[in-house]
Image: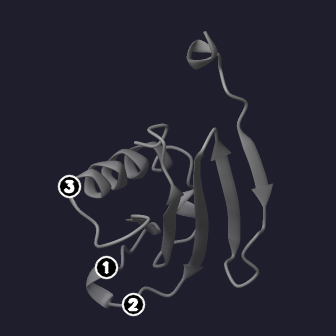
Amino acid sequence: SETNQMRPPQVELRPLLRADGSARFRLGRSSALAAVYGPREPRSRAREAFDRATLDVVVRPRVGFPGPAERQLEGHLLRQLDHVVLHQEYPRTQITVVLQIASDDGAIG
């Protein structure tokens, strides 16, 4: 049946010009927009790490306010991205990743 077939993902790079990096991801009818800001100076000194960059992940739902599902996805993304970000290259900085859910047919999260 059609529901058992793998759907090819689509990626568009740099859809947001004001972000330091961005991409739009589509999988079936689900889509999300990711933006990276930084490395830049932390908003507060309490968030600053002497020997590495601080990584923040924010997930915004399609509508409304973030809830438990978004917090869980933030934690998952933070754990995954923590392995690939070169923290030591950018001490005393902050890197923020913002994921905006545009539509979700169950492929996200």
Residue in the image at 59% along x and 77% along y:
38
Residue 2 rendering spot, x and y as whole percentages: 63, 16
Q: Earlier in the sequence, mark 1 or mark 3?
A: 1
Q: As drawn, is 21 to the left or to the right of 52?
A: right
- The quadrant of the rendering that contains the C terminus is top left
Q: Quadrant of residue 63?
A: bottom left
Dot 2: what SS? loop
Q: CA distance from mark 3 to mark 2?
A: 25 Å
Whether 39 is drawn above or below 69: the answer is below
- The quadrant of the rendering that contains the N terminus is top right
In terms of depth relative to the viewer, which is nearer, 53 or 67? 67
Category of crowding for the residue at label 2, using alpha-carbon neighbours closer than 10 angstroms: few (below 14), some (14–19), many (at least 20): few
Q: Earlier in the sequence, mark 3 or mark 2?
A: 2
For this orientation, the residue located farthest to the front is: 1
Whether 74 is drawn above or below 15: the answer is above
Query: In the image, what residue type sits under mark 3?
Result: Pro
Residue in the image at 57% along x and 13% along y:
4
Query: In the image, what residue type sits under mark 2?
Result: Arg
Dot 1: what SS? helix
- The label number, if any, that marks residue 98 in the structure image: none
Q: Which residue is mark 3?
A: 68
Q: Which residue is mark 1?
A: 47
For this orientation, the residue located farthest to the left is: 68
Q: Which residue is mark 2?
A: 43
In terms of depth relative to the viewer, which is nearer, 61 or 18? 61
Query: In the image, what residue type sits under mark 1?
Result: Arg
Q: As drawn, is 18 to the left or to the right of 53?
A: right
Q: As drawn, is 5 to the left or to the right of 56?
A: right
Residue in the image at 76% along x and 81% along y:
17
